[in-house]
Image: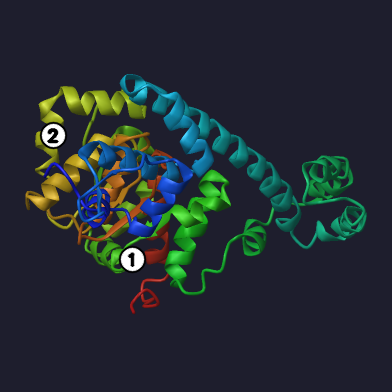
Amino acid sequence: MVDCLTIKELTDAVGGGISPRMVRHYHQLGLLPQPQRSPSNYRLYTEKDVLRLQRIMALKQQGFQLNHIRQILEIEPEADMNANLMAQLQQQYRTIIQQIAQLRHTASALEGLLGRDRHCQIMQAEVLAQLKLLEVESQTGWGGLEKLWHGLDAEVHTHSEVFAESLQHLLPDLSQRSEIEQYLISQLVLACGDVSLVSFIKVSQSAITASRQALASGCEIVVDIPTIAAAIDQTRLAHLGCHITTLIDNPHITTAVEAEIAFWQHQQWREKLTQVSPGSILVIGYAPSVLLQVCTAIEQQQIQPSLVIGMPVGFSHAPAAKRQLMQQTLPFITIEGTLGGGLLAATALNALVESLIAKPDCHCHQT
């Protein structure tokens, strides 16, 4: 990098969509110090300005307001920048989690109303009439709603829950997705009880078609640990002629932490991964490093699975592994971010298997 940069060179170096106009605005707010001027009166910036502007942009992306960012930059000594930044990010994270928790409480209350089937709606009409007296959008309003649950819940003792009807009220519009994909999504929601999962489920365009072709041909199913194998519908898979291979076939490994450590410490599991048969379906629900290695092996053309169901849990490696998976041209089904787990991964495969057996001639997934 040259010693001095123009304002255009500064914005190009920082990236992220920042413009010269935004830089001038940050000068006015005191976020950026006024730069030196050239003999022609052009603003001249240094590498230090680049780093400061990158930091401002990073804080903005984390949700900080500009006035708060200015306070952070004013308070922090340069030497303690990283430590203080982490403390500020932790505080921001806690605030966001509190907001999510409050929204989750609100969503739960709405689910408690919208998710009622027709048998419960008789009692619900009385509750809704009383709700009109509450400020239902406030925390106080939802607290008042708790007093009404007793009467509303009385009806649940008269019949079993009608899951399909509840989901019909709660799920977002999925009409643009195929019938099989809608079923897959609904099964994943039922497995975890969280409707917000829908926005994180990612199904590549050819995933449904690839899964049906592979399963119909009796492909190998490769899972990362025995816990997933136990949750898979082995009777239906046997009907299709599919057999299950467990990558880390140690029955004592039952958690994501154990699976991650085992995969890192023992070369035999990494070597076994490169030996999976072409056209297999990989089901990964625990170890993020397994999914990372799968992506690498695919890129290096060491393995050629027909589909990857990648849903490991974790807070850094798992989101990164899923991003790498979504960049592959190979068919995939995943859940963005930290969400996932063995039950969801197994549920995804079971839904695909069940839909194939129930509707072998369905072509709704082909566009």
From the top left corner, tell me how far across and down residue 162 is, in percent. 68, 57
* Distance from the alpha carbon under mark 2 to that under mark 1: 28 Å
Q: Residues within 10 Å of mark 2 (few under 14, many from 20)?
A: some
Callout 1 amino acid: Ile
Judged left or right of residue 120, residue 291 is left
Residue 184 visible in the displayed image: yes
Which of these two is toward me, 145 or 60?
A: 60
Does the CB distance between marks 2 and 1 fall below 8 Å?
no
Which of these two is toward me, 322 or 364?
A: 322
Vertical arrangement, residue 284 with respect to residue 8, above or below: above
From the top left corner, tell me how far across and down residue 289 is, in percent. 23, 35
Residue in the image at 79% along x and 44% along y: 142
Which of these two is toward me, 49 or 176?
A: 49
Question: According to the image, label 2 marks what residue?
Answer: 270
Q: Residues within 10 Å of mark 1 (few under 14, many from 20)?
A: many
From the top left corner, tell me how far across and down residue 75 is, in percent. 46, 25
Residue 208 disc label: 1
Judged left or right of residue 12, residue 364 is right
Vertical arrangement, residue 155 with respect to residue 265, above or below: below
Vertical arrangement, residue 267 with respect to residue 138, above or below: above
Q: Quadrant of residue 264?
A: top left
SS at mark 1 in the image: helix
